[in-house]
Amino acid sequence: MCEAPRPPCAAAGDAAAADVDVVTTGGRRRIPAHSSVLAMASPVLASILERRLKKDRESGKAGRSVVRIRGVTDAAAAAFLRLLYAGRCGDGEEEEDMEKHAVQVLALAHAYQVPWLKRACEGAIGARLTADSVVDVLQLAALCDAPRLHLRCARLLAKEFPAVERTEAWRFLQENDPWQELQLLQGLHEADMRRRRWRRKRAEQRVYVELSEAMDCLDHICTEGCTEVGPAGRAPAATPCARYATTCRGLQLLIRHFSQCHRKSCARCQRMWQLLRLHSALCDRPDTCNTPLCRRFKEKEQEKAAAMKAGDDGDKWGLLVKKVKAARVFSSLANRKPQMSSTSQC
Ligand SMILES: [Zn+2]
Ligand SMILES: [Zn+2]
Ligand SMILES: [Zn+2]
């Protein structure tokens, strides 16, 4: 519920102590009001009232000063005043006012600089947004500088574009405002590209995390061993590790296949070679490391690095190593908390 600082206890239309008349378009309605309440609610009304009251005082005009609210229906202007007096959009009459006149009240709240009322109107209009109304509301949001409402419209447009395309409002826009149509289509295209980029990045990140977990399991298999596979000359630990079902078992099967396979070209063996090479690139203790081929790969990489120019951007392998290293750091930080809580078991 949006709320403003509460004005003094008074109501729009209450003639007692009223010192201004708010006149609606065409002068059909004249609503008695209090300049102090209006000035407190809106800086624009405060400035208008200051000038008006000063002018009327100087000219010696009798009676209440007049402030005009133009461009909206009488009912909407009256609702605007009621909401300014209430200082909030709760239930009852204020809720009814918002339901009936939110669009016009938004325009007034923008023109008279009443931020809390503007937010409330954005919420009320956004809650009733449909494929039929979204094009008109988008234009309203642009005219009233209402970013929250614009965002809701953009989301609905992206979600229900086929339905929006069939509406009368969209056809009208196509015929009369091709620039606006182009702008909306560009916005949709950019949002779609952003979504695709985000999905691709997430998928990549998942692969790096999986590789990082595989590296941890390879370390663990080659140092402690796990159920069926262990370091050379030692029996593996009999109890399965915490990652047995997700990563460790698959890696053990791959290692066993690698040790038995004699095919020249085998995708599974190729994968194992890549994992061993990745381990070697990440390993900082090749002299004492138990992982097969760690030292050999390290020496080969060092020879290759010496032959290459430093900082070659085309080194995709180097980039992969960096990404997996970063993923390892992140997962070790993420795992630190549960590890700390289980230190009592060690
Ligand atoms: Zn394990
Ligand atoms: Zn194989
Ligand atoms: Zn190693």
Image: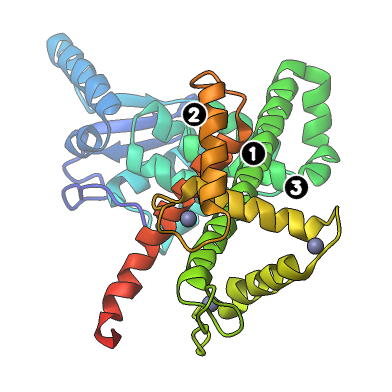
Q: Element type at marker 1?
A: helix
Residue 142, given in percent of the width and then of the height, sits at 55, 27
- The single residue placed furthest to the front in the displayed view is 233
| Residue topped by disc 1 | 197
Mark 3 vs mark 1, foreground winner is: 1
Q: Is residue 326 above or below residue 56?
A: below
Packing grade of label 3 (10 A; few <14, some 14-19, many >=20) is: few
- Measured in 3D between alpha carbons, the distance from the residue under mark 3 to the one under mark 1, in whole angstroms, is 21 Å
Q: Quadrant of ligand 2?
A: bottom right
| Residue topped by disc 3 | 160
Q: Nearer the viewer, residue 56 or 70?
A: 70
The amino acid type, in three-letter code, at marker 2 is: Cys
* Left or right position of 251 against 148: right
Q: Residue 144 shows which numbered tag?
A: 2
Q: Element type at marker 2?
A: loop
Q: Nearer the viewer, residue 329 or 309?
A: 309
Q: Which residue is at 73% across, 46% downward?
A: 131
Q: Element type at marker 3?
A: loop
Residue 127, given in percent of the width and then of the height, sits at 56, 54
Residue 328, given in percent of the width and then of the height, sits at 45, 54
- Measured in 3D between alpha carbons, the distance from the residue under mark 2 to the one under mark 3, in whole angstroms, is 24 Å
